Image (cartoon, helix red, strand yellow):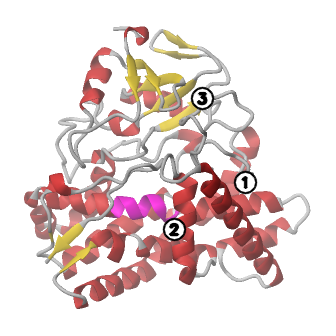
Amino acid sequence: MSQHDQVVHMPLTTDGPLEPSADWKRLREQCPVATVELPSGDTGTLLTRYDHVKALLSDPRFSRPTAEDDSIRLTADGATGVAADDDRSMSVPLKGEAHLRWRRLLGRYFTVKRVAALRPGMVATAEGLVDSMVKSGQSADLRTALGFPLPIYVICELLGAPAEHRDRFSYWSDAFLSVSRYPKEEITAAHSEFVTYMSELIAAKRAEPGEDVLSTLVVESLAEGEGLTDAELVATGMALLVAGHETTANMIGKMVAMLLADRTRWERLLADPSLVRTAVDEALRFDTNQATFGIRRYLGTDFDVDGQLLQGGATVFCVPAAANRDGRTFADPDEMDLGRNPNPHLTFSAGAHSCLGQSLARTELQVVLEVLLRKLPTLALAVPVPELRKLEGFVVGGLREVPVRW
């Protein structure tokens, strides 16, 4: 079946909050290069096979669409948040040598070694949050009690942002990642507030630098020819604050829900906690509720996909969650194998645009799992899996709440 035999409508639907879209398997087998129609009515190209998705994401020539690209819109009114369509406050370079330079500057703060040094603090914070959760009763919403606060404490400490402002950060992040949750006017106002706040935080770091990442970047920017411009500093702070907590907060809830959805998974980890590391990566692979529209790439030039030419100017939607279920790469792809190794999933993308904070995210997920297994071995979902509600209207995917008991 060729690309033009059918049109797929995004976002794709699923049979349940933790289930993959039935369209993924059909598309991988019958129409791996498909035409996709967005809520805006614009059309692009959809890739679902592992090799195709990895090849495009790994190609350094292509990046997320920017303001100057003639890329398609996700929604008709364009109210899709900075993270989706509006680069008004996003001065982070997304292409070419400038992007590589930006990644080099930031990458040294997210190395495995640096993240390992943060681990004891993460453990202490996670233990405190779980203790507070237990003191309040025999049940809780894990997303509210642990999933959201842990990553925000971690990223605030790393950046040197006040954790007591976490409710504001959460609201701005939601606006940053909104597809249809807020009207465009509210998104624009939230962006302006966020830019103002981050500009003032950067100015405070310049006046009185600390030991945090933002302070270090500010100090480096004062050296001529080094570091980042003021606009880049503001955009970088915003991007790290959003990316550093929103996706991880969602993933904590989804990971625990997946592990508790089949009790044998939780029991296996209780019997062998050494599986935590591989279990986290398997949860990342197995997660069906990732980015609502996958990962977008704007083609600045033609790109060949197994003999099928995608012409320059096209917007391509890569779906890592679908690629992660490709049987050509993963044995028993629809089984959650907690000991799976190797596990070359594409949840963090690939190549020059792979997630800078993936080591930080993995460590937070491992810490959460280790603490919960140790402190709450009787943890269970408080509602049947079909009653879990998906987070709708955002670029990122998650669960609205994760009710648990112990």
**Image quarter (top left, top right, bottom left or bottom right) of the N terminus:** top left
What residue lies at 46% left-to-right and 32% top-to-bottom? 318
Snapshot quadrant of residue 205: bottom right
Location of mark 2 (residue):
170
Type of amino acid at the residue the image marks with label 1: Ser
Magenta stretch, overall SS: helix
| Farthest residue, direction right | 224
Tell me: 65 left or right of 138.
right
* Residue 317, image x, y percentages: 48, 31
Looking at the rendered structure, the secondary structure element under dot 3 is loop
Q: Which residue is mark 1?
A: 89
Residue at disc 1, secondary structure? loop
Marks 1 and 2, how far apart at CA: 18 Å
Q: Are marks 3 and 1 in contact (CB under 8 Å)?
A: no
Against 230, residue 207 (above or below) is below
404 vs 222, left or right, is: left
- Give the Cα distance between marks 3 and 2: 28 Å
Which residue lies at the image location 44% right of the left edge and 30% below the top edge?
Answer: 53
